[in-house]
Amino acid sequence: MTDMIRASLPDANVPIEDKLKLMRSHIEYFSSVLMCDTLSESCAAGYKDMLYTELQNYITEVHHKKIFRISRIRKNGDCYYLWATDIAKNKRITASKLEDLYQKLFDYYTEGSSSTFFTTLEKQFPKFLRDKADYVSAKTVKEYKQVWEKYFAGSCIATTEVHALKTKDYRKHFVRICKTFQLTKKRFMDVKTVLSGLLSYCVEEEILVYNPIRDINYRKFPYADDISSSHVKSKAFTLSESQTFKDWCLEELKKPNIKKVYIYALLFNLSIGLRFAELAGLRWEDINFEENYMTISGQAVLQVEMHKDLTFSSHGRSRVNHVKSHEEPRLIPLLPEEVEILQKVKALNLSETFVFPQGDFRYHTYNDKVKKAAKEIGLDPSQYHTHCLRATAATNTYNACQDVRQVQMLLGHTTPEMTNRYIHNNRGLEVLRAARSTVMANLVQ
């Protein structure tokens, strides 16, 4: 029987699930033989050795944490040692003998349903999404699903038995998708967040004992160049282009049968730089016409519903009483020209609640207007979109005051580093020349 068992050991090409099942059958067989009363001492010793070897092989495949020795002190002062290994945060298994530790680990990993143990990330992902839906928006869950389908679904790490995957397998997959999809570091971290969340869910469900991708060094990955490291992926209109853009809008307003609300929105946002969601969520009660300022305390976000079959449907935008995560509500003083634009919008009587109401103000139409304006003033429309107005407001404000902190207050960013990405300092050389001239003048004096 022993020779038959040794002959049936799997080779390296056998699927890990079959390999582990075969190992388990060997361990169960050796354990049952050792319970036989008629077994001689020499045979029992041989079976114990084979059992220990099988336990070692099994644990090597499924347990990726280090096994080490720790010292303990008895009450009488004597020192003794234990074999130990960590299986989760603040959870450790110990034994006085190494073979006993392997047996405890085997019992730990094989406890419960084999269908849960022999599982894959692909099988667990739908459960993870449903769990995630309990505490994040359906929009975020939908984004997680899109990331999974694009970067992970059907891959080796998605379809291989989860206990057979090691840190190097995840690292290999990450390097591959970085090269294949030309991921910037920022985009890669967004993608990694989805997989990390899934693995953490598996830890919480006691399918895994730890999250293996926490051990990966991400600093040397082949990231694509991140052009947004110093600037956002939107070009600011220069001061002269801003004036030409404004003139184009004024000419558009003279035309019959156009939706003036979009043109007013372009003129308004050219100097104030709100996000589209903030613009769409702006209410008349947020405008103080007496003291000429407005409050940005909410945004109109797309409402997404998740169904039981993990499909999604959208139900337009509705206002939420908070701005982008971690940002505080902000007060923005209004220029006379901006107040005049708002009064003209009010005269259109589109809504008693919203300045730019959803039914008459849609993102894609607004975005198309920006591209049309760029094209008709002689620019490449593919390089411009709604966020360009935000970058333009940031750039023009900075060039006027040379104070990043003031621009940060206008845009509502939590850090000046983020604000700097929006500033296309096209007057940098001019300002530096003036500053150096002042230094020279002071030295001469």
Image (cartoon, rainbow, N blue to C red):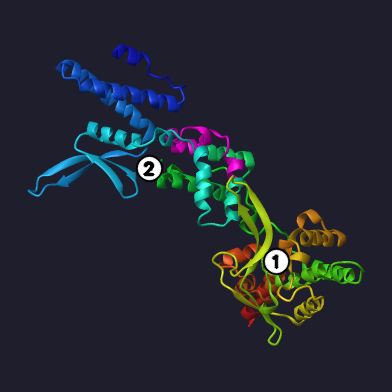
User: Front-most of 87 and 83?
Assistant: 87
x then y, percent, for residue 273:
70, 69
Q: Quadrant of the C terminus?
A: bottom right
Q: Quadrant of residue 164?
A: top left
| Secondary element at image label 1 | helix
Instruction: Residue type at mark 2: give it.
Output: Val
Residue at the spot x=80%, y=71% of the render? 264
Determine whether 166 is above or below 285 in the image: above
Highlighted magenta segment, given as a residue range: 147-172
223 inside magenta stretch: no
Determine whether 416 is above or below 66 in the image: below
Determine the CA span between mark 2 and mark 1.
46 Å
Q: Which residue is mark 2?
A: 209
170 inside magenta stretch: yes
Q: Which residue is mark 1?
A: 390
Decide if residue 199 is on the left or right side of residue 190: left
Q: Residues within 10 Å of mark 2 (few under 14, many from 20)?
A: many
User: Front-most of 98 and 378?
Assistant: 98
Instruction: Residue type at mark 1: give it.
Output: Arg
